[in-house]
Amino acid sequence: MSEYQYYEFQAIDRPLTEKDMRELRSYSTRARITSTSFVNDYSWGNFKGDEDVWMEKYFDAFLYLANWGTHVLKLRLPSRLLDIETAHLYCPGEQAFAREKSGKVILTFLSDEEKAGEWVEGEGHLSSLISVRAELARGDMRCLYLGWLLCAQSGELDDEEVEPPVPPGLGQLSASLESLVEFLRIDTDLLFMAALASRPIVDAREKAQEIRKWVANLQADEKDDVLTRLMAGKDLSPATELFRRFIRELD
């Protein structure tokens, strides 16, 4: 069976410019390129770009899949939503690691499992995983903890390695987190044992009255700034930043 490699990049926080798309097109004449994505697969030849550079410059999410068993997911978030120290605490190995570049933290999750050239399809995988980024941006650490479990499962961690805080809700995974467990081939028995130490998650959306009271106490100029940024459509993160503040103060 011939080889198969699938590459998909997604821009979430801001669309690609015409200049960006022209630059990307110079790397491939047959890739599907839109203002928010670059998608291509290869049965012969190789990707001519550099996924790490592209994540720094253009995109917020990347998925790679090959029929010999390699799975890769990369996520990029502003440093104000995820600090690099926290990312390093949960992702300390080669299967899950983090780096910071120009005010952005880029996470990489890697799963290698030899599949002897079995038939695979890349289409649809990233769409099932993309919500993980939004959850993480809102302060949900379960994605990062799955990265730590991946490192532990692969034998990368020393016996004296200190386990990071277990986030709530490991026994209540969202559909996107369940897809991440499957994509990274995390042992479900290992996840079950970790979930025993995880308290139930509290959905802040059920606390509408508390949120309303909290928002009412914000300064008027801060509210005006957030609404302006949202309506202008140039910055999609202000609501996420406020929600994270609410969660921190709620705790």
Image: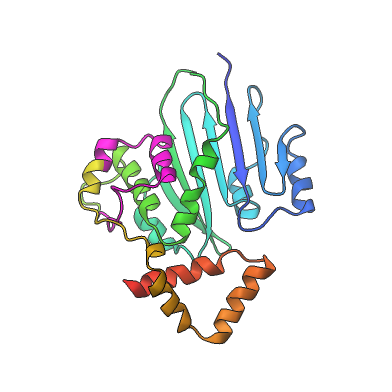
Percent position of residue 109, x then y = 44, 43
State the quadrant of the C terminus.
bottom left
Towards the viewer: 28 or 190: 190
Percent position of residue 1, x then y = 55, 13
* In the image, farthest residue toward the front: 209
- The colour style of the image is rainbow
Residue for point 58% across, 63% down: 102
Residue for point 79% across, 52% down: 18
Percent position of residue 209, x then y = 40, 73
- The segment highlighted magenta reads 162-191
Percent position of residue 169, x then y = 31, 53
Towards the viewer: 19 or 97: 19
For residue 56, above or below residue 221: above
The magenta stretch spans residue 70: no
Residue 131 seen: yes
* In the image, farthest residue toward the top: 1
Residue 91 seen: no
Total number of numbered discs in the rendering: 0
Query: Would you identify the image quadrant in which residue 5 lies?
Result: top right
The magenta stretch spans residue 164: yes
Left or right: where does residue 157 sit relative to residue 121?
Answer: left
Left or right: where does residue 7 sit relative to residue 85?
Answer: right
Left or right: where does residue 233 sit relative to residue 142?
Answer: right
Residue for point 40% across, 28% down: 113
Query: Would you identify the image quadrant in which residue 17 lies?
Result: bottom right
Residue for point 36% across, 60% down: 203
